[in-house]
Every structure is written in structure tokens, then in C-alpha cells.
Amino acid sequence: MPFCVQGDPDNYISLLSAAQIETLRLVFEHKNSKEIARIMDVSPHTVDERVRRALKKLNASNRIEACLLYTSDAADDT
């Protein structure tokens, strides 16, 4: 099933905050919330909240979809 992203479909990352982008980058690296929290010096709850808000902005249903959008947009920027 295709995703429906709000905003400019050619630039998904522009919808996200810097903290959400960094969080998704770490999710893409297969880090869990506790590991990400340690790296970013925040609580695991904050990590989960950033992921949840990023999912909502991207209209993605899970972390995998969000990472696919993140990587496709990041690849376009290179």
C-alpha cells in the first residue's frame, strides 16, 4: 500500500524537526529507543514521542515506513 505524505512529496525531510531527523537516522541504524535516548541524552519517552510525531507528519504507520521515506529523501539529496 503506498504512503500518502502531506506537504512536498519531493522533500519529506523538510516536514521534520532536526531532532526528529536525527532520531530517524538512529532508528535506521537499528537502534532501539533506549539506545537512542542514551546517545541523544534524552529519555526513552522523548525518543518515542519524536518517532510518534515524525510518523504522524509523514503519515507513516510504523518506523520501517518512516525510515524508508527518510532514506529515499536522503538519497535524493546526494
Image (cartoon, rainbow, N blue to C red):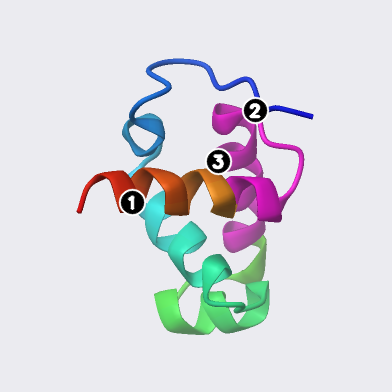
Q: Secondary structure at mark 1?
A: helix
Q: Determine which residue is flagged by label 1.
A: 74
Q: Residue at x 65, y 72 (%)?
A: 33
In the rendered image, the quadrant that contains the N terminus is top right
Helix, strand or loop status at disc 3: helix
> Disc number at residue 59?
2
Is mark 3 in CB contact (under 8 Å) with mark 1? no
**Comes first in the chain, label 2 or label 1:** 2
Rendered view: 42 above or below 45: below
Task: Say which amino acid is labelled 3.
Answer: Ala
Disc 2, SS: loop
- Residue 51: say if magenta: yes
Q: Are marks 2 and 1 in contact (CB under 8 Å)?
A: no
Query: In the picture, residue 32 is in which quadrant?
Result: bottom right
Q: Which residues are magenta?
A: 46-66
Circle 2 packing at 10 Å, graded few (<14), some (14-19), many (20+), is: some
Query: Percent x, y for residue 60?
Result: 67, 36
Q: Residue furthest top?
A: 7
Mark 1 is surrounded, within 10 Å at the Cα level, by few (under 14), some (14 to 19) or many (20 or more) other residues, namely some
| Residue corresponding to mark 3 | 54
Q: Is residue 25 above or below residue 37?
A: above
Picture residue at 52% right of the left edge, 76% below the top: 29
Label 3, residues with CA under 10 Å away: few <14, some 14-19, many ≥20? many
CA distance separating discs 3 and 1: 15 Å
Q: Please identify the residue farthest to the left as the structure is shown.
A: 78
Q: Is residue 60 visible?
A: yes
Query: For the point 52% across and 16% down, which residue is it?
Result: 6
